[in-house]
Amino acid sequence: MEDLWKSVSYSQTTLTELMIPSYANFGGKIHGGILLSLMDKVAYACASKHAGNYCVTVSVDHVEFLQPVDVGEMVSMFASINYVGNTSLVVGIKVIAENFKIGSVKHTNTSYFTMVAKDENGQVTQVPGLILENREDARRFLEAIKRKELRNTYKKELDNAKTLLEVDSNKHIFLKERCKIEF
Ligand SMILES: CC(C)(COP(=O)(O)OP(=O)(O)OC[C@H]1O[C@@H](n2cnc3c(N)ncnc32)[C@H](O)[C@@H]1OP(=O)(O)O)[C@@H](O)C(=O)NCCC(=O)NCCS
């Protein structure tokens, strides 16, 4: 695998699906889980094409639905490899929802799936290097490195904070929140 390189454009994948009534909640809005499942599918297709192996989802960086999606809208997910490590890759996915009747296009979210490639024995395996074909590819690659650094810092700080989260010495915090302590 040492000398194998693939371009970003080689594995770019788009998934488009009509939002049907069975995907919706009682308010007629699409369940977030439906969109997550579609994102996972497109991330798998994109990552596996680059890797030339099957890939598993390890983590999802930030899912925040900025706008609701309605029944009858056409959702498109644009996936491309933003970063490759040794055995892992980051797939950036931009999600848009189009309403053809009124001619609107909404950007609902952009999320980053970290996937790891596995071989036929279920062992993690190296992925091809990434050829960055333009400045946008290069910018996304740098952004992925920054995101990884920030995630590591966040994780360390959260682990540290957890050790200080002692209930009795933090009762003033509960007083400012909408909760009642009944023990
Ligand atoms: C992903 C998995 C193989 C990692 O196992 P591991 O023993 O930690 O393997 P490694 O330490 O060699 O890490 C492999 C790669 O995953 C990356 N990785 C591991 N945990 C990660 C995390 N939480 N977030 C981001 N990347 C992670 C490592 O950085 C490494 O990347 P690199 O090779 O590009 O440097 C293992 O946790 C797994 O199989 N998880 C289940 C995945 C799955 O089945 N998902 C479907 C949902 S059920």
Image (tube, rainbow, N blue to C red):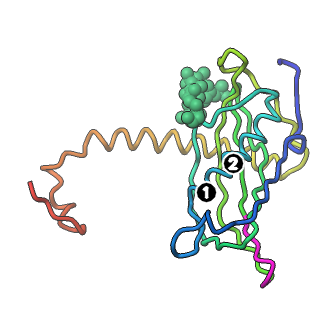
In the rendered image, residue 91, in percent from the top left (x then y), is placed at 72, 44
Q: At 87% across and 37% down in the image, what residue appears?
A: 131
Residue that appears at 21% across and 65% down: 179
The residue to which callout 2 is attached is 143
Q: In this view, does 31 lie to the left or right of 104?
A: left
Q: In which quarter of the image is the C terminus?
A: bottom left
Q: Nearer the viewer, residue 38 or 124?
A: 38
Q: Quadrant of ligand 1?
A: top right
Q: Against 100, is 2 above or below?
A: above
Measured as percent of width and height from the top left, residue 103 is found at 81, 81
Dot 1 corresponds to which residue?
34
Q: Which of 130 and 123 is in front in this view?
A: 123
Q: Position of residue 146 (x, y in %)?
A: 63, 45
Identity of the residue furthest to the front in this view = 22
Q: Give the percent coordinates (x, y) of residue 109.
A: 65, 62
Secondary structure under badge 1?
A: helix
Element on which disc 2 rests: helix
What is the crowding at mark 2: few (fewer than 14 residues within 10 Å), some, or many (at least 20)? Answer: some
Quarter of the N terminus within the rendering = top right
Circle 1 packing at 10 Å, graded few (<14), some (14-19), many (20+), is few
At label 1, the amino acid type is Ile
Residue stretch in magenta: 96-102
| Residue pictured at 24% horizontal, 46% vertical | 165
